[in-house]
Each structure stands twice: as C-alpha cells, then as structure tokens.
Amino acid sequence: MHGYLWFVGKRALQLLAVVFFGVSATFFVTHLSPISPVDSALMRMTSRANFAPEAIVAMREALTELYGANEPLLSQYINFWLRLFRGDLGPSMLAFPTPAMDLVMRAMPWTVALLALATLITFTIGNILGGLAGYYQNSKFLKAFGIVAVGIQPIPYYVVAFVMLIIFGFLWPVLPISGGFAMNVTQGWNWPFIGSVLHHATLPALSLVLVGFGGWFLSMRALVSNVVTEDYVTYAELAGVKRSTIVSGYVMRNALVPQLTALAMTLGGVFSGTVITEQVFNYPGLGSLLIDAVNAGDYSLVLAVSTVSVTAVAIAIFIVDLLYPLLDPRVRAE
C-alpha cells in the first residue's frame, strides 16, 4: 500500500508540472502573438457603427485596461495565475460581458462526452479485435478486418469527417450534419433531448472511431503475436487451460500494459481530432469555441479553453497511469 501511495504521489507531481508548463506556454504564445486583442475588439465594434475619434480612443483605453495590456508581461503572467486560481479569466469579447470560463463550462460537457465516447469505443473494439487477431491468426474474418484497419488508419480525421458528411448528409441523408441537438426539443434530462444529442453526436463520434480503431487493432495484434510465443502461454495451452482464459488472463492482460502507455500518449492527439471534427460538424464543443476565439482574437477565451483542455488531458493521463498497477504487478512492486 505504501508503495502504491508513493507511485500516486510521483504521478501527481508530474501532473502538476505538466499543467503548469502547458498553461504557461499557452499564456506566452498568446501574449507574444502579433495580433492585438484590443485592436481585434475595436475592429469588431467600429465595423458595426460609426464612432467619433474621441469615443474610439476612450474604448481603446478601456479595453487596454480590461486586458491588462498596459502592464509588463511578467505582471500580466502573475495576474493571470492569480485570476486562474479564482476561476476568473475575464470577460469574453465574443459574448461580452459573459465571463470566458462560463462559455468554456457550457462547451466542455459536449467535448468531454464526445471524446470519452470515441476513445472508449476505439480502445475497446481495437484492442479486443486486435488481441483476437493476434491469437487466432488463421481467422479469415480477422484478416479481412486487419486489411480494412490498415487502409483506414493513415487517413486524417478531417478527410473521414468530410466523407461521412457527404455520405450521410447528402447522398443518404439519415443523420444530422450540424449542431449538437434539434432546435425543437427542450434542453434538460429528458428522453427527447438525450435522444437528439445522441443522434447529432453519431457522425462526429463515428468519424473519430473509424480513424482511431485501426491503430489500436494493429498495435494490439502485433503485441499479442509476440506474447503467444512466450513459455507461460505454451505451458497453459499444454496444461489444458481454456482458450478464453488464456486469451483474457494470460495474453491480452499482458499486452494491455503497453497499450495503456499508448493511450496516455495519444489522448492529446485524440483531442486535436475532436477540434477538427467539431469544426466540420459545427458541434458545440471546446474545439469550435477555440477556433472562434482564435479567429476573433479573444485571448481571454483562448486562454480559458487552452487551460481547461491542458488540465483535462493531463488528468486523463494521470488516471490512465493509476491503472498500471492493476494490470502489471511489477509497477505495484516499484
């Protein structure tokens, strides 16, 4: 027990370090960008109506003070962390005066649900079928499935998303291609709304699943192909142990350890895929919100989305790390 607590403590320190450096990098990238949030906000305001020069000067001064752009970069950095600890990153200029964190909290459940659903399906299906393909190497069905996985796996997210959009949105219009739910349903914990959300999430999730399962299938098949040659697997087969027990308890459990490492490493890439997919399907998640914030030069919203995204992905990796001792006793011994 003491060893496991020490393991958790080390991983928690790594989590804090990743969040700190990731959020800090986001801050400096946005604040060293040549695009000024004050100029972007002024451009949007003045494009809608004619203002007197004195009013434009007053608005510039007010926006400069609001963003803290008149302070040194180090002071802005310290103030950013102080405001972050209070959960206040300032108002969003896209929906002024709504706080940026409020917009992020509204969009986060959509992305978390989509990311969790797609990751769970791809990881489960890819590893189960890949493990079976590595053990039952003469299965024609699993060989055919492997050919399909090899063909789909290198295709980028956005290509699959556009293909799905054309097929199910225009050629065979049976699925919605935009939005997170139907406009004629009442939001809340009711079956019409939940069904509409699942209906609208089908295409975004399916595009992520089609791209993601191939990598898990191929890697798991390769790992299991090596594990089945180990002496303990051969001994279990000669001893008459059930095939199902050998596959689940001896082969796939040992092959899953490096797969968890791969899962932790690819979570950030999967989140990048959701950003592209949400933009293609106009899905109301963090990805669409981030693209809108970048295009509008809304740095408060960019920092809010980036901070929450970095923290969420780091926590997900931390949880995956904690699963290692459950699969590999050597980690528990450490």
Image: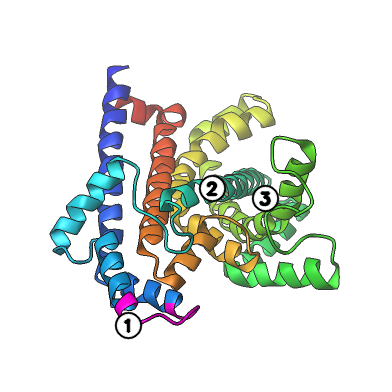
| Disc 2 target residue | 106
Q: Nearer the viewer, residue 304 or 61?
A: 61
Q: Position of residue 39 (x, y in %)?
A: 33, 76
> Is label 1 in a helix, a strand or a loop?
helix
Q: Is residue 246 magenta?
A: no
Relative to 17, 162 lies left or right: right
Q: Is residue 308 placed above or below 239 in the rendered structure?
A: below
Q: Amino acid at mark 1?
A: Pro
Residue 22 placement: quadrant: bottom left
| Disc 1 target residue | 53
Disc 1 from disc 2: Cα separation: 37 Å
| Disc 3 target residue | 137
Q: Amino acid at mark 2?
A: Arg
- The residue positioned 62% from the left and 35% from the top of the image is 247
Span shown in magenta: 46-55
Disc 3 from disc 2: Cα separation: 47 Å
Q: Are marks 3 and 1 in contact (CB under 8 Å)?
A: no
